[in-house]
Image (cartoon, helix red, strand yellow):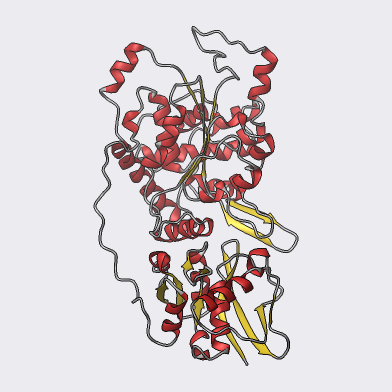
Amino acid sequence: MRASAFSVGLIGLEGQLVEVEAALGGGLPRTVLVGLPDTALYEARDRVKAAIQGCRLKWPDQLVTINLTPASLPKSGTHYDLSIAGAVLAALHVVPPESVLTTVLLGELGLDGRVRAVRGVLPGLLAAVEAGMTRAVVPASQLREASLVEGLAVWGIDTLPDLVEVLQGRPVHPTLTPRADEPPADAIGQPDLADVAGQTEARFALEVAAAGRHHLFLHGAPGVGKSMLASRLPTILPDLSPAEALEVSAIHSLAGILDGDLVTRPPFADPLHNASMSSLVGGGPRIARPGSVSLAHRGVLFLDEAPEFPKNVIEALRTPLETGWVTIARSQVTCRFPARFQLVLAANPCQCGNFGVVGLHCKCAPMAVRHYQDRISGPIIDRIDLQQHLVPLRNANLKASLSRAESSAVVAGRVAEARERQGRRLAPLGFQVNGEVPGSVLRHHLPPPGGGELIDLALVRGQLSARGVDKVLRVAWTLADLGGRDAVEVAHVRAALAMRRGEGAEVAA
């Protein structure tokens, strides 16, 4: 007797349909699992057997061979439990064998037959739809997440007997009904740009970074507001587009942090400075999982106290900053995760934080100051579009700024208008924001900017690299968009050069 059920194998965000074959034959009663399973999956043979017997269903009293096809694809995770149980029950004709041929089964089984949540339901079901599947069974707790996939009839189950009912044509849970609109969250206590006192130039740099999706480096003495500014960057960013929201939600599902609803706001990731390489860029012993750079995809990656991060961890950001992707190679498989994030670095001037601060004495030796600042290498700094130095506030400035600070909603309105101008200009070229436009497109497919002699002079003086020229042009276009201009003017280029060098600038509209 033989029957097949279907699950999905995930390599990164790419899913492939996996056929789970169960064959019953002669020989001593035992269970054999083949098809490149990992340890968690290999243990499924005992877990599924105990679950089936715990629900007073029959387990074969003969040799059971379970094969996961394609056999060359490494397989990992506990989400195969439900498909293994479905294949065995179909081979015993407890459920109709044909019922599992068009149904994708995802879920982990407890020893008492309970169905538990698993990682990667959303990307798994997206891959199932592409493969032509029309039905799916998932844990009831993840039914809302599964409902984000169109073109698939989804049922949620709590126990293994529920699976039997569904496959026999008596679903115990209807397909998910539309969720009711939830009341808006209380705005009191939420981060807002109005909380930042003073720092007019830094606020403007944050607005420019948000408008063009530019990378930003904030440096200054402790307590001047670097972390506060960075944490408020997501509050002035526009909502994700439907395609972006689905992509970000799939990554979060794979990481096991999706709460069931579509992620519509840009994510914010702020790993601690003791983060390992694998936690930042992704990794794992067999099949890699997404790291912070991918969890921040289409959002903000904030590295506070950036010089305190291990140097190799910071250097690992070079490739994703340029390409928007992270590729992690393993002996059996290579995973690829999207990582088009907006980087914000924050750093003190030295170990004690007082170097160069008026009225404070630095305790660090000159070589220690230089060594501390050199922990962020030149190639990483060269990939940063904007640098902003923050200075401590004085009493008079603090009192004056509290009454006129703009809120996130006001700044977000200007950012949205600038993004709209970028969208109209860049849509025919296949891009959305200035920060992602390649240099060749900037030079050959957009109107020539004014202020070219300023850029040439900076190149001659060694103040700009070839990459830096493209960075300046991108920022200049963003400044033009914020000012409502259709072309880059000399003032925009001058301001972009100043902001790249960390001198601060405010360009007039």
Q: Is residue 218 above or below residue 264?
A: above
Q: Position of residue 248 (x, y in %)?
A: 47, 56
Q: Is residue 67 above or below residue 117?
A: below
* Residue located 36% across and 78% down the image: 172
Instruction: Give the mark count.
Output: 0
* Residue located 43% across and 87% down the image: 168
Q: Is residue 290 above or below residue 300?
A: below
Relative horizontal placement of residue 330, taking residue 392 as reference (left or right): right
Instruction: Find residue 312 and report its image quarter.
Output: top right
* Residue located 60% across and 39% down the image: 275
* Residue located 35% across and 76% down the image: 173
Q: Position of residue 130 (x, y in %)?
A: 51, 75
User: Is residue 449 at least partly visible in the picture?
Assistant: no
Relative horizontal placement of residue 268, taking residue 46 as reference (left or right): left
Q: Position of residue 157 (x, y in %)?
A: 42, 73
**Quadrant position of the N terminus in the picture:** bottom right
